[in-house]
Every structure is written in structure tokens, then in C-alpha cells.
Amino acid sequence: MHILLIEDDLDLGRALQAALRIDHFTGEWVRRAADAPHTIDAALVDCVLLDLNLPDGSGFDLLKRWRRSGLRVPIIVITARSALDDRLAGLDGGADDFVIKPFATAELVSRIRAVIRRSAQQGSEQWTIGTLEIAPARREARLDGQALSLSPREFQLVMELARDPGSVVAKDVLAQRLEPLGDPVDFAAIEVHVSNLRKKIGAQRVRTVRGIGYLLEP
């Protein structure tokens, strides 16, 4: 899962990047409002961590702009501003959560997982798609109650398809999401990983939409 972090504090930014890596998130970090993307590709970003006090502007302005554009990616505001008016303005302005500094990184990671889970319309930390169960935090998957032995890439692949079961994920989107900080994964490599995944969860569960991509049968 890929996180966009907008935070000007060097020490906090580095600590958050390290904590995210430990919990198997990838992340991009910018320190100014001007460096934040004007629009966010919801197919490539799972959650935004947004500081309100930036050196060249207000995080509120970014929040409002993104929500006005129709962005539905979860956004968590992280700020030292603890006044009730600020919290209400953030939540009413479209933030999915509001975390006051200082905070424990473990709590923030838990909140990230919670908002991503809600955006995927999953009610608990264990995602359920038919008889397929996925536990993102533990990086475990079960089928009919039996643990699956998935490679890191196979687990990453099934997670991406499980974000929206029944919807097609284009190959080029998968290629970028599987390697968000590097060169996109080669299409031929994706086909190999899909083939291996099918052998473990059942060929009928991952459907190829010719010329477009793949979908996980709900």
C-alpha cells in the first residue's frame, strides 16, 4: 500500500517514513504545499497524511482542493493544532481522521489501516471476499480456513485486486502499484505472478479481462 506524506518537519518525516517501511507500506514524502500533486491518482495512492502548517501554505487549502475535485482517497490530517474548531474544520472539510501531534507512530499506522479498510468497504482488519480472507497487517491469507503460502509479490497482487472485488484493475495500474517507487513491473512478470496466484487460490477467482487487466471475483 502506498502513502503520500506531506509534512515539513524533517525529524518527523524521517521517523514516519521508517515506520511505514517496517509495516510494509511504501511512501512518497514532500515538505511544501507547492510540491504536493495538484491532483492525486486514486489508483496509485491509498492514503494521504497531511500536515496543516506548511511553510508555504495551509494544508486546509490542499484538502479543500482535492475534495472539490472529487478525490475519494482517505486523508488523515496530522497537526499540532488541537483546538476544537481546527478539528471540526478538518473533518467537515473532508478529512477522514484527525491526529494531534505528538502521537505514537503505532497508533498512526493503525489509523491508516482503519481508513484504508473503510475505503475498501471492509468492516474489520481481516478482509473477507467469499471464502478468501486477507489480513493486511499480518500479511496473511487464508482460503476456506487454510493458510496460503503466498510470496511477497503474490500477496501484494491479491491485496491490490481485493481493494475493489469485481472491478477490473488495468495492467498498467497494477504495474505501477506493485512497484510505486521504481520502474513499473513488466507485464510479462505480472502474468507469471497472476498464474502462480491462480494455482494457490483457484483459477476461477482471478479473471482476465482481455486487453485491459484482471479482477478478483467477489
Image (cartoon, rainbow, N blue to C red):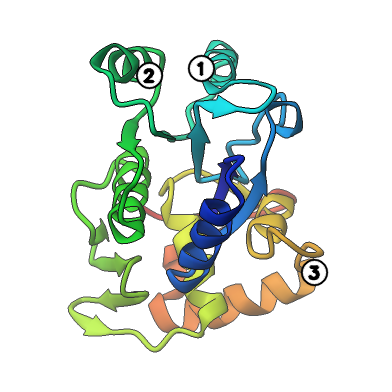
- Residue 46: x percent and y percent? 50, 46
Q: Which of marks 1 and 3 is in front?
A: 1
Q: Residue at x 41, y 76 (%)?
A: 202
Label 1 to label 3, Cα distance in Å? 38 Å
| Label 1 secondary element | helix
- Residue 117: x percent and y percent? 32, 47
- Can you say whether 146 is above or below 204 in the image? below
Q: CB under 8 Å between callouts 1 and 2?
A: yes
Q: Which residue is drawn at 32% across and 37% down?
A: 99
Q: Residues within 10 Å of mark 2 (few under 14, many from 20)?
A: many
- Residue 186: name its quadrant: bottom right
Label 3 to label 2, Cα distance in Å? 40 Å
Q: Mark 3 points at which residue?
A: 186
- What amino acid is found at the position of numbered circle 1 in the picture? Phe
Q: Which residue is drawn at 69% across and 70% down?
A: 190
Q: Residue at x 30, y 48 (%)?
A: 111
